[in-house]
Amino acid sequence: MNRPMLLEPTLHHLARLPQTRSRRAVLRDAVSATMGISVVAACVPNPVRLGEPRPSERSGAPSPTSGGAPVTLEMWLPGRQADADALAPFHQEFVAELPRVAGVNVRLVTNEAMMEQLTATLAAGNPPDVARLKEYRLADLGARDALLPLDAPVAKDPHVRLADFTPQSIEGSRAAVPGQKGNRTEQALLGLPDSHQIVVLFWNKDLLAQAGLDPAQPPASWDALRRAARAVAGLGAGTGSGGNAETGGDRAGGQSRQSPWGFQFYEFSMREQVYCWFMEWVWRAGGEVWSDQVRNGQRRNDPAIRRARLDTPEAFHALQFHVDLIHGDRVAVPPGTPVPELIANVAQGRTGYWMTTANAALTYERTAPGLRFGIGPLPPDRRDAHQLQHNALSIFKASRAPDAAYALISFRSRADVQARWAAGGAWIPVRPALWNRAPFNQDDRWRAIGALVHRLGNRPKPVVPEWEAFTTVVLPHLLAAWRGEEAPKHALAAAEREGNAHLEARG
């Protein structure tokens, strides 16, 4: 089955990889080449006309609606060759509907290299026509005035209704762009939602049953999770399930560990996703990690005046809870554990509970045969909260064929196309109505994911300028606390101070 590049790589890839310290490195090594080309294509009849393309190295190529020769669009995709191959039949349909488009060159770019390479092409005046972007990159490129606002063409497009998408995906697809007057900014629609991502709780049903816990239900609170993790960690050797009963080494104490882990965090690394999942724990503790301030009459939710808010009782409660699981109870997999080992812990039955992306439920049958697992929400402390992230399809202002580029993303946004794309590739749909049709309303795995996507506590990722640069500043202190090298209170105060200094410096 063709499937997306999950944040949890597959075991057959990892078997050939050296040990690494982060999922970022694993994903980089799992991609056989930084870039691949796959000629494919897509469309809608009578596409909405946009403005004339900006000058670029390809500006001589005519728009497909101008009566000239057919054009070939270029789409950048962070992922693997299998992801590009999965798009081929959809894009072939697109070409059949809009013959004046000769095809779509899908260029694979590693997630790590995406912004650097886009920046270079923008400077040269020849960016791709379309790219699939995470919401924070959409915001960064919008601030550079690099993306085409889509409000006007969407309003004229009979195939796209924003009300048909989840509110979180639409909110996350809007970002500030330079306004017409002075320094004012406008919140423009800079992409059409493509797929969701959400980090949730999984558990090993066999380990929970052996520990006397309910294998059908997730813990209802942080205290319940802690007790359950202790119970699983108290099991003796040889209790693993899901393919291999061996247990891993106890890296926290340098001793051979003879019992399963009670809990496994998503990952400890410098990737921005680590700050995302920490943010969610603060939300569940009843806190917030941003405070919007009024400055020069600007509105309170303007990301340009957003400030970090980490030195709070709620953030301390969340971070101390993590430290207690890792170093106090010694039931959580500690920082420094290589990513292949984290994934093997799941497949070989070496952890009772773990955090990963929800669509992993659709691949465990292949990557972890024999694993009997449950899937549910991460428990609340004071409130339920999950971050419903998403990818969007965006058009660059310097596209040589903006009409055809819009036709492509409009086609990709159709309900029937998104249904087939999501079901075939294990992508989480951004159209709520799709959950009422097969396979999403029949397969138990899809139904469990759908229930998580529709939880009332779900929120989009906050819009923060230069998000990756910001997380690079604050994560070292959080990592030091998780490793037991820095007191949680001190780590949070330093992260807030240095994070806000970074925001102030960038203006």
Image: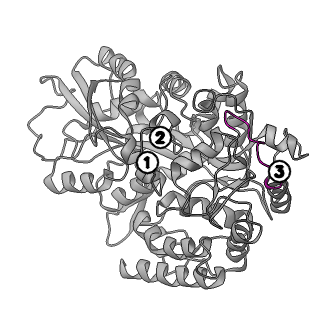
Q: Position of residue 382 (x, y in %)?
A: 80, 65
Of the two numbered discs 1 and 3 in the rendering, the one whose residue sits closer to the viewer: 3
Q: Farthest residue to the front: give it.
A: 256
Q: Earlier in the sequence, mark 1 or mark 3?
A: 1
**In the rendered image, which residue does mark 1 sit on?**
26
Q: Earlier in the sequence, mark 2 or mark 1?
A: 2
Which residue is depicted at the point 31% across and 63% down?
180
| Residue type, numbered disc 1 | Val
**Residue 189 seen in render:** no
Mark 3, other Cα within 10 Å: few <14 / some 14–19 / many ≥20: some
Q: Is residue 206 left or right of residue 104?
A: right
Q: Position of residue 60 (x, y in %)?
A: 8, 37
**In the rendered image, which residue does mark 2 sit on?**
14
**Residue 449 seen in render:** yes
Marker disc for residue 59: none
Q: Is residue 379 left or right of residue 185?
A: right
Of the two numbered discs 2 and 1 in the rendering, the one whose residue sits closer to the viewer: 2
Mark 2, other Cα within 10 Å: few <14 / some 14–19 / many ≥20: some
Q: Farthest residue to the top: give it.
A: 96
Q: Earlier in the sequence, mark 3 or mark 2?
A: 2
Q: Position of residue 449 (x, y in %)?
A: 68, 36
**In the rendered image, which residue does mark 3 sit on?**
235
| CB-based contact (under 8 Å), mark 2 and mark 1 | yes
CA gap between label 3 and label 2 equals: 28 Å
**Callout 2: SS:** helix
CA gap between label 1 and label 3 equals: 31 Å
| Residue type, numbered disc 3 | Leu
